[in-house]
Amino acid sequence: MRQALELARRGLYTTHPNPRVGCVLVRAGEVVGSGWHRRAGEAHAEVHALAQAGELARGATAYVTLEPCAHHGRTPPCADALIAAGVARVVVAMEDPFPQVAGAGLARLRAAGIAVDVGVEAAAAAELNAGFISRQTRQRPWIRVKLGVSLDGRCALADGRSQWITSAQARADVQHWRACSSAIVTGIGSVLADDPRLTVRLPDAREHGTPERIVLDSHFRLPARSRMLDEPGPILVVTGPVAPDRADLAGRVEQITVPLHDGALHWSRLVFALAQRGHNELLVEAGPRLAGAVIESGLVDELIWYLAPAFLGHAARPALQMREPAGLDELSRWSWHSIDPVGPDLRLILRPPPAAPTWSWTDPVRAPGC
């Protein structure tokens, strides 16, 4: 199963909105076939593994990181392919939360007389597909907020200069998080201040494409000469209901409108809409105000914090703008997930504590005015 998980990770940048899945076929203690799902619309992991195994698949055990599908989507059901190939046993890491599968694939295998075991390396499989699982079970993507800060919690000098606080190694590491995201979210304030491209700068970037760039822009102020417009890949502008028409951007960006609440974009409605567009994982790269508001909303699943060993001083700009709690008993506390050196910097990954309340897309949380 660990080999299957390693294979699944090869699709980390390419499979969305589908899950990342790997499959290994073993017969008489020898691997006779293996494969992974490479991108949506193409053959699933089981099909690749069966094609490689050929007749050796008969009587083999299939190790699959996610329940084989039981429905006709872009491709035929993998459960049927395993049955037709004559495999004797299927070991599955976890059940597929997709409603059209959700146990149906396991039931079909068992009905065909195939032995089925579920739960091997389940936690690792769930971690690999946290975004897909979130979209299926919570109707929203898995949301990460990325920040680069100094030791004193600052993101830029008082005049706005911020290039570069963190190291080249940290900036290269960010490209991984961009590549495995189906969308990168920023605010119009960051676009006006920094004119970012928000592209994936990896050697094989053309192979996995560019995540959708999403700009939160209540009043549709996106400049027609923004550098991101010169880059390939989709751009979505999220506006308020009274945003002006922009004939100069027609055909260059897609626009959707979400409701306002107290003059700000309704964040919970937004992330629900993004889930409906098939987004599994969102990476928020934004200024202090938007980043702070997203964290305060209670919707963030993961903070990715690059900490540079430097001080910027009290006049420098804080990395986050957040409300001060009324007392220490109201502190927003997070749990350490990992701490890793990246060049001279540290990459801190934090998640909400397990006891954090669950979220519903109808909750009235919102993004700040953009």
Image (tube, grey):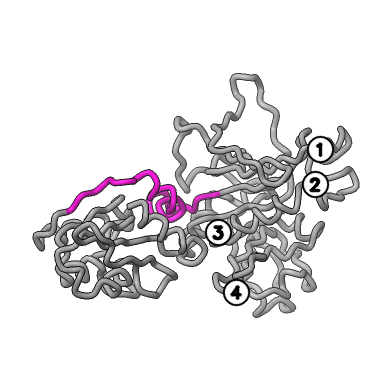
Categorize mark 4 by other alpha carbons within 10 Å: few (<14), some (14-19), many (20+): few
- Disc 2 crowd rating (10 Å Cα; few below 14, some 14-19, many 20+) is many
Q: What's the CA distance linking mark 1 and mark 4?
A: 35 Å
As measured in the structure, the alpha-carbon distance from the residue carrying label 2 to the one carrying label 4 is 28 Å
The image shows residue 152 at horizontal and vertical percentages of 78, 33
Left or right of residue 226, residue 11 in this image: left
Q: Going from the N terminus, do you reach mark 2 or mark 4 first?
A: 2
The residue range painted magenta reads 116-143
Q: Which of the two discs, 2 and 3, labels the residue nearer the N terminus?
A: 2
The residue identified by callout 3 is 181
Task: Name the residue at 55% across, 39% down.
Answer: 298
Name the residue rendered at 72%, 78% in the picture.
247
Indicate left or right for 293 with 319 as reference. left
Q: Is residue 305 left or right of residue 130?
A: right
Q: Mark 1 near mark 2, Cβ–Cβ under 8 Å? A: yes
Name which residue type carries label 4.
Arg
User: Does dot 3 land on a helix, a strand or a loop?
Assistant: loop
- Does the magenta portion include 142? yes
Say whether residue 270 is magenta: no
Q: Which mark is residue 159?
A: none
Q: Secondary structure at mark 1?
A: loop
List x then y, in percent, for residue 117: 20, 49
